[in-house]
Image (cartoon, grey):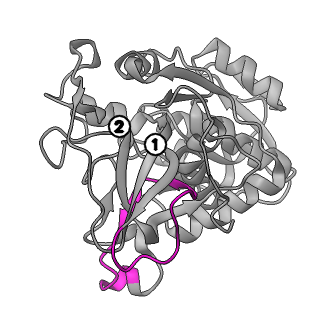
Amino acid sequence: MRAWWVNEPGAISTRPLVQGIRAAPRPAAGEILVEVSVCGVCRTDLHLAEGDLPPRHPQVVPGHEAVGVVIETGPDCSRFRPGDRVGVAWLGGVCGRCDYCRRGDENLCVAPVFTGWDRDGGYAEQMTVAEDFAYPLPPVFTDEQAAPLLCSGIIGYRALKRAALPVGGRLGIYGFGSSAHITAQLALKQGASVFVMTRSESARELALELGAAYAGDAYDSPPVPLDAAILFAPVGGLVPVALRALDRGGTLAIAGIHLSGIPSLDYGRELFFERQVRSVTANTRADGREFLALAARLSLAITTTAYPFEAADRALEDLAADRVTGSAVLRVRPDDSQPNRTAASW
């Protein structure tokens, strides 16, 4: 099969991704084999390629927003059948035994498995996934629309919950890429006012088109105090900026898996009056199920920029340079047409 993998992590300009031919995987017990049609391009893939996230094994295949069709099931599988359309997300396995798993916080598992980091991901024509960690997908979304939902959407949904936005509140969003443009719609459809701060002019235009009340530069101050904020940009220097924009009792949720250094904080200006900072760590499968159902019900508009499979390295370069509006996706197959696909009991 064709695949991309991280050869030697480094700056994306050094082309750390390599394309070639790999042996097709085989499903083990409890796993399904998926023929990938589309895979989203996430900033976490960029962190992996550049070494901010050290690869967990040599020549790992990135990609954790994969959509495709089941073509084979391993022993002991019962949830899916060949022909079912499924999505594969970032969380690919948990131990199920630690205190965090037992209390329902599997995103904090002490021995998690992540797609496209611990195990090969969706920058390939085929991939395997534990069937317990695959999702049936709402039929309302095409493959290209569904792919970003599997990380950008799910993580944005969890970040919005962590931000504790009150009903009808004022939400600030710092950085407006794949996850942010989905999360903004969730907040707007729940009656919030959204204020976007981002360095990308095209992203500011998209934010206003989607209904944001304000769109300014990343370091601008919003015109009103914020009840909550989410930092999507991996820029630690924006943490004090966002905290200063919060009203009393406001919460800042930091959504990324990687963040550059945070400057020292001024207690009086940035933390006093019970402002707080929360991190966001992966997601639970319950988050995924809840979000996908919500996305279908709310008919979210997913803006995508599509790249041919051969241009995965260019997609990451454009992501690094903020040249992507909405969500970047790789078309592993030339289009969304998939014979004999079913809805996998959505």
Rendered position, 4 above or below 70: above
Q: Looking at the image, how many numbered discs can be counted on the residues?
A: 2
**Disc number at residue 124?**
2
Residue appearing at x 27%, y 72% in the figure: 110
Question: Which span is picked out in magenta?
Answer: 74-101
Q: What residue type is labelled 1?
A: Val
* Residue tagged 1: 36
Q: Do the residues labelled 2 and 1 touch (CB within 8 Å)?
A: yes
Q: Residue 292: horizontal and vertical position, in percent?
A: 67, 58
Marks 2 and 1, how far apart at CA: 7 Å
- Is residue 10 found left or right of 42 in the rendered image? left
- Other residues around mark 2 within 10 Å, as few (<14) / some (14–19) / many (≥20): many
Rendered position, 331 above or below 165: above
Q: Residue 157: horizontal and vertical position, in percent?
A: 63, 55
Q: What secondary structure is marked by label 2?
A: loop
Q: Residue 96: horizontal and vertical position, in percent?
A: 34, 82
Residue appearing at x 48%, y 45% in the figure: 66
- Other residues around mark 1 within 10 Å, as few (<14) / some (14–19) / many (≥20): many
Q: What secondary structure is marked by label 1?
A: strand
Q: Which amino acid does label 2 sit on?
A: Ala
- Is residue 295 found left or right of 168 in the rendered image? left
Which quarter of the rendering shows the N terminus? top left
Which quarter of the rendering shows the C terminus? bottom right
Residue appearing at x 48%, y 81% in the figure: 104
**Disc number at residue 251?**
none
Place residue 31 in its image quadrant.
bottom left
Residue appearing at x 12%, y 42% in the figure: 58
Return the residue nearer the eye: 341 or 262: 341
Place residue 29 in its image quadrant.
bottom left
**Taken as a whole, is the magenta stretch helix, strand or loop?**
loop
Return the residue nearer the eye: 161 or 333: 333
Can residue 297 be spotted in the picture? Answer: yes
